[in-house]
Image: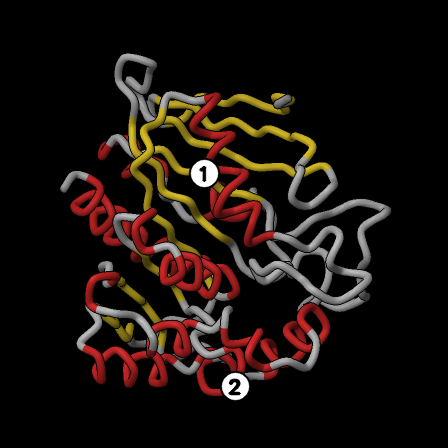
């Protein structure tokens, strides 16, 4: 059952927040949805799923990205889930890059995290089924995200290429098995088996993608991002893409950092990119 927490009219459409008890994460989850003007049971619209980064909730993108005007114009719904399970019974650490707010969009295998930290199943299976059941949307969907969420969007699209028309990311963690954020999260959520880690690494997944499973991918990365060299490593992703002729377009944006100022500067281009593929 969905509990409607808020409803606010914006750009002729509606921004709404909901909570529900998740069968994937075994706790109460929250998500936000933007429905563009004219969306109805007789005029269903496609959906862009947005995955946010470390420390974020469903609110950051909806409030800061400036995406809703363009989404209203293009007739695209946007769904923004939370970034992790939350609650008093959900294991946590006093750390911004692990635990609550840092689910990394995987299914944890290690106790005590494996009961609740199943964000992969939540995003891939549970949430789309819920959205398609309760809102005037089609089954056509795209996926995007920022930083940890960019990692999640690319991993999910690469593992489920027939489910998404396109994928994009801002400042994604492209190769988590080779960066500090990924090492910390994967070792605690997944244990020491690096074969398991590879299931949630975009570079490793792309290496094993056949041309039948290619889907359009756009990445924007600021060259003044303080995390660029140590954590994000877009050059590793582009190297793999070139090896297999994967349809990746990387836009290095001069002077931009890791913030929502960067996202808001190029979100319209991402929405237009997804719109062109959602229509095809």
Task: Identify the image quadrant of the N terminus.
Answer: top right
Looking at the image, which residue is at 23% across and 53% down? 269
Looking at the image, which residue is at 81% across and 66% down? 94
Looking at the image, which residue is at 48% across and 60% down? 152
Looking at the image, which residue is at 37% across and 53% down? 264
Say which label, 2 or 1, has the lower sequence index.
1
Q: Quadrant of residue 24?
A: top right
Task: Identify the image quadrant of the C terminus.
Answer: top left
Residue at which label 1 appears: 79
Disc 2: CA contacts within 10 A as few (<14), some (14-19) or many (>=20): some
Residue closer to the observer: 229 or 165: 165
Frontmost of labels 2 and 1 is 2
Residue closer to the observer: 126 or 147: 126
Q: Quadrant of residue 28?
A: top right
Residue at which label 2 appears: 178
- In percent of width and height, residue 267 lies at 32, 52
The scheme the figure's colours follow is: secondary structure
Query: Looking at the image, which residue sits at the far right?
Result: 88
Asked if residue 45 is positioned above or below residue 99 in the image, the reply reads above
Disc 1: CA contacts within 10 A as few (<14), some (14-19) or many (>=20): many
- In percent of width and height, residue 257 lies at 43, 71
Q: CA distance from mark 2 to mark 1?
A: 30 Å
Give the side of residue 239 with respect to residue 26, left or right: left
Residue closer to the observer: 11 or 157: 157
For residue 41, which numbered disc appears in the image?
Answer: none
- In percent of width and height, residue 173 lies at 47, 72
Asked if residue 263 is positioned above or below residue 231 in the image, the reply reads above
- Identify the secondary structure beneath mark 1: strand
- In percent of width and height, residue 133 lies at 46, 23
- Identify the secondary structure beneath mark 2: helix
């Amino acid at each position: 059952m969905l509990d409607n927490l808020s409803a606010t009219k914006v750009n002729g459409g509606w921004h709404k927040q909901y909570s529900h008890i998740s069968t994937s994460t075994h706790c109460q989850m929250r998500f936000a949805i933007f429905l563009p003007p004219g969306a109805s049971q007789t005029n269903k619209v496609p959906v862009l799923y947005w995955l946010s980064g470390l420390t974020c909730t469903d609110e950051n993108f909806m409030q800061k990205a400036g995406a809703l005007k363009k989404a209203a114009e293009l007739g695209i719904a946007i769904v923004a889930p939370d970034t992790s399970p939350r609650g008093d019974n959900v294991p946590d650490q006093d750390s911004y890059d692990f635990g609550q707010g840092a689910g990394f969009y995987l299914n944890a295998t290690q106790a005590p995290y494996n009961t609740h930290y199943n964000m992969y199943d939540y995003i891939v299976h549970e949430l789309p089924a819920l959205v398609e059941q309760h809102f005037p949307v089609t089954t056509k969907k795209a996926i995007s995200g920022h930083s940890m969420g960019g990692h999640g969007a690319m991993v999910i699209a690469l593992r489920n290429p027939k489910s998404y028309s396109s994928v994009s990311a801002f400042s994604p963690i492209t190769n988590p098995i080779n960066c500090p954020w990924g090492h910390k999260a994967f070792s605690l959520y997944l244990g020491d088996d690096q074969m398991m880690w590879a299931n949630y690494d975009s570079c490793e997944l792309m290496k094993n993608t056949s041309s039948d499973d290619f889907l359009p991918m756009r990445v924007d990365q600021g060259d003044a991002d303080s995390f660029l060299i140590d954590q994000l490593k877009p050059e590793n992703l582009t190297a793999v893409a070139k090896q297999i002729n994967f349809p990746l377009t990387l836009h290095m944006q001069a002077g931009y950092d890791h913030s929502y100022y960067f996202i808001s500067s190029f979100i319209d281009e991402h929405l237009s990119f997804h719109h062109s593929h959602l229509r095809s």
